[in-house]
Image (cartoon, grey):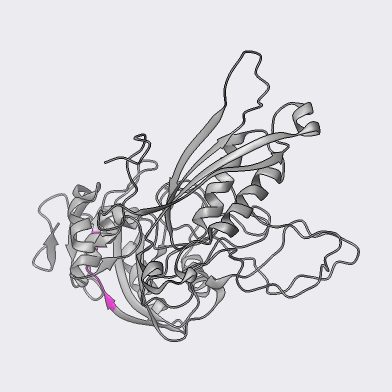
Amino acid sequence: MTTNDESRPDALDASGRRLDQIRLTGITALGYHGVFEHERREGQTFVADVVVHLDTRRAAARDDLAHTLDYGALAEQVAAVLSGEPVDLIETVAERIAATVLASGVVHAVDVAVHKPHAPIQVPFGDVVVAIHRDRTKLPAAEPYVPRPTAAEPVSRPVPTSTAAFPVTPAPGAPAVAAALPAGAWADAVVAPAPGELSVGGPDTRSTELETIPDAVVDGELVTDALDQAPDGPVEIVLALGANLGPAQETLREAVSDLAGTPGVEVVEVSALARTSAVGGPEQADYLNAVVLATTTLAPRELLRATQAIEHAHGRERHERWGPRTLDIDIVVYGSVLAVTDDLELPHPRAHERAFVLQPWAQVAPHAVLPGLGGGPVGALAATAPDRDGVRWLALDWLTAPIPAVGNDTAAVPSGPRPGPEVLDA
């Protein structure tokens, strides 16, 4: 099945059904993008076509703009990107537009085509077009559109708690904390996490109010967004734990205890312990992995900070992409929230293809469903996950009974038959 232009497969929802589309074509603005000095000086016309993939049924049933995309606001933002901060490549312009669209929680995927009809090419031509497709599994490689303050605006002022220029709507039943990408400097305001980890979190450096800087223009605001807001009541969460350095089983035991002792977090269930092969990265020891089901009254970023503090307490360091680690705690699900920000994405963008998360989760919650793009019944996802053969076994009574170790305790790993009756074959 293809789109109307027969050029790309349709975007599908978590159940494999074709999503609806909102198309904006021919958005035109004068921009100053290009590698040549005269392009930056004189400017030229740029044109953008945007196809947004989403489910419009809820908005139609309620006849309510709050449950769909405000395409008028989006058109203004796309035009602002075209006429905004100059860059060398229209590839970058396309990525910025895609990031701006995906900042909305109702959007599953987006197609962007940026036209440069007056490109400085020395032979006759009709157009130059860069076309990209981005979704929750292949995120944009640039920051979203962010309005900058002007010299006439006051620098010291309260920062709004929501920066979405068009509605951000959580899935039905979710707490009202789905978020758009926050305003502020993409690179300057947030410490970026090490790439390649299951988690996409990084240290949070936001403040709720701008520092007073007389006679200055702020280039990169520090702001809060909806992921900093606590929910109205307890929210169900799923956390994935992993370790392969040092006494991994003991570390994971202590991490579960630390989570249970965290104010605002109540541990409900702990999965069996999975022994798994490392996915990606350098050659390294097997991992021990577990999933914790809990409830929380913490805001998503408060929870992120709490889990990172536990990681740090157990010696977590981020030096090598997909490298070995003493402890990794990832927020897989926070209620039914769908959000993409610079430091946190919910649900976790790779959870749907990680057997070391899905198999323990399915074991403790057989009817669980992973929300969001690529989601679905956890048991079914576990059965088809690309790394499913890397799950060696699941140990049931691991919180109290010793099991074969990994990491620095490789001497304890048996070379013969697998452990006894407390272990489930994967």
- Judge from the rendering whether residue 53 lies leftward or rightward of residue 84; answer left or right: left
Q: Quick check: is 271 in the magenta stretch?
A: yes
State the image coordinates of residue 96 (x, y, percent, origin top left).
58, 46
Magenta-colored segment: predominant secondary structure: strand
Report if residue 262 is visible in the image. Answer: yes
State the image coordinates of residue 177 (x, y, percent, origin top left).
49, 74
- Judge from the rendering whether residue 409 lies leftward or rightward of residue 379; answer left or right: right
State the image coordinates of residue 367 (x, y, percent, origin top left).
19, 71
Tally of numbered tags:
0
Q: Which residues are magenta?
A: 269-274
Q: Quadrant of residue 189?
A: bottom right
Q: Is residue 213 above or below residue 261?
A: above
Q: Quick check: is 355 in the magenta stretch?
A: no
**Farthest residue toward the right?**
215
Quadrant location of the N terminus?
top left
State the image coordinates of residue 105 (x, y, percent, origin top left).
46, 63
Quadrant location of the C terminus?
bottom left
Front-most of residues 345 and 192? 345
Report if residue 144 is visible in the image. Answer: no
Front-most of residues 368 and 320? 368
Front-most of residues 136 and 41? 41
| Residue at (81, 32) in percent of width and height | 41
